[in-house]
Image (cartoon, helix red, strand yellow):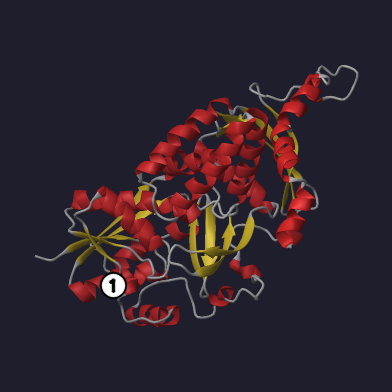
């Protein structure tokens, strides 16, 4: 009886080669599993392409709503940006794709699953750690770690010889991954960090130089940290993300050229486009400034760093991530209100913010005649606040004299 393998299939170069290679290598029946996470180009003709490549079955799952509500928005509420920059569209999509792959494998009676991740990338860990958590008995194939191809050019030649339809060419060898939260682009000339990104590498944003000369204004309403309305129109999570993505991308917002630290210990240069993610993270952060108390806000910034690391490193289904969600969810009870932003030639700037939970008190902040702050109370506060340092240096000498003593 033939082995049956469920393959995470995007229709791109690597996974197209994998479908045929697994059939040749293991004489296996392969099932192509494609997750619709809001990508646009990759879904066109993906079923037909899978069948032409020899798949016994091609399954396309619409996971957009689940992706937005159960993966994207938790990360947004946490403020999770890897290395303070990357909103992690690819990183967030992988655990959901792994979950879908496991579900199909179980339903179809597969003994194994396969993915198209390289041996020096992050995605191999994201897939395999998720699969280990969800279905520890499933066998996992990672063809890119063991097959004979040494370059994308060799894969392209293989496709051409075997009649496998792919978009990649030797002249345009970018590796592209896309979903509603963003696009990642790598390979080709981008592997040299001294080379400026060619304009043809970008997929969903207008060059800031070519963006409209008239700025665009967007108002985003949040409820418990979740965006619920755009420019006064209440939208579903998917609709809001996609609509905002178009507006921001048309104004050149959301481009990121990043040299990042991969899980496997190397640095890689990636281009990212995340128009909606860039705007929503900015707006959410500004609303938190208005509504979170100082200690919670500062502590949450530490949590955001850890949360981003968990996502990036493939630990979405870890107990720690679930525990951090409980903390984050508690903080978001007060993150309600609206933020108005200006988008102009790649820039995002703040116009206004409002919240029914605002901790900003104009009567305390103002320097006008209606100032309600008790200035006299500050004298006693400063006296107590400075007491530890005053005591220390009275005993040990002034900071300057102490440093001079150490230098000698």
| Residue beneath the point at 41% across and 51% down | 36
- Answer yes or no: is residue 148 visible: yes
Q: Position of residue 321 (x, y in %)?
A: 41, 43
Mark 1: which secondary structure? helix
Marks counted in the figure total 1
- Quarter holding the C terminus? bottom right
Against 255, residue 2 (above or below) is: below
Question: Which picture quadrant has residue 226?
Answer: top right
Q: Position of residue 31 (x, y in %)?
A: 25, 60
- Tell me: 126 left or right of 81: left
- Answer yes or no: is residue 10 visible: no
Against 85, residue 118 (above or below) is: below
| Residue beneath the point at 32% across and 49% down | 99
- Quarter holding the N terminus? bottom left
- Callout 1: 10 Å neighbours few (<14), some, many (20+)? many
Q: Position of residue 290 (x, y in %)?
A: 67, 30
- Tell me: 311 left or right of 211: left
The residue at which mark 1 appears reads as 20
Between 107 and 184, the residue placed more toward the observer is 184
Between 134 and 237, the residue placed more toward the observer is 134
């Amino acid at each position: 009886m033939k082995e049956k393998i469920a393959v995470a299939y995007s229709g791109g170069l690597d996974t197209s080669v994998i479908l045929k290679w697994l059939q040749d290598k293991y004489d296996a029946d392969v099932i192509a599993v494609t997750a619709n996470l809001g990508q646009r180009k990759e879904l066109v003709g993906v079923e037909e392409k899978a069948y032409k490549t020899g798949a016994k079955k091609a399954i396309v799952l619409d996971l957009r709503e689940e992706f937005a509500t159960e993966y994207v928005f938790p990360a947004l509420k946490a403020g999770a940006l890897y290395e303070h920059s990357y909103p992690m569209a690819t990183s967030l999509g992988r655990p959901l794709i792994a979950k879908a792959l496991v579900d199909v494998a179980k339903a179809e009676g597969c003994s194994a699953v396969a993915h198209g991740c390289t041996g020096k990338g992050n995605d191999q860990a994201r897939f395999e750690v998720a699969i280990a958590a969800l279905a520890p008995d499933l066998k996992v194939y990672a063809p890119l770690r063991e097959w004979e191809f040494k370059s994308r050019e060799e894969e392209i030649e293989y496709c051409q010889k075997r009649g496998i339809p792919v978009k990649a060419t030797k002249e345009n060898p970018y590796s592209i991954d896309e979903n509603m939260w963003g696009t990642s682009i790598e390979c080709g000339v981008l592997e040299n960090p001294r080379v400026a990104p060619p304009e043809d590498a970008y997929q969903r944003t207008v060059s800031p130089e070519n963006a409209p000369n008239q700025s665009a204004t967007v108002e985003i309403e949040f409820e418990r940290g979740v965006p619920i309305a755009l420019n006064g129109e209440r939208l579903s999570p998917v609709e809001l993300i996609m609509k905002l993505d178009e507006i921001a991308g048309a104004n050149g917002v959301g481009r990121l050229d990043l040299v990042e630290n991969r899980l496997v210990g190397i640095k890689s240069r990636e281009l990212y486009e995340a128009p909606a993610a860039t705007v929503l993270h900015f707006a959410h952060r500004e609303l938190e400034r208005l509504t979170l108390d100082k200690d919670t806000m500062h502590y949450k910034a530490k949590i955001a760093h850890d949360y981003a690391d968990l996502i990036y490193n493939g630990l979405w289904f870890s107990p720690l991530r679930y525990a951090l969600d409980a903390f984050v969810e508690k903080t978001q009870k007060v993150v309600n209100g609206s933020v108005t932003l200006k988008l102009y030639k790649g820039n995002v700037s703040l116009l206004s913010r409002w919240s029914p939970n605002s901790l900003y008190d104009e009567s305390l902040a103002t320097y006008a005649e209606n100032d309600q702050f008790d200035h006299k109370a500050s004298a006693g506060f400063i006296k107590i606040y400075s007491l530890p340092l005053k005591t220390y240096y009275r005993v040990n000498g002034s900071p300057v004299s102490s440093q001079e003593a150490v230098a000698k």
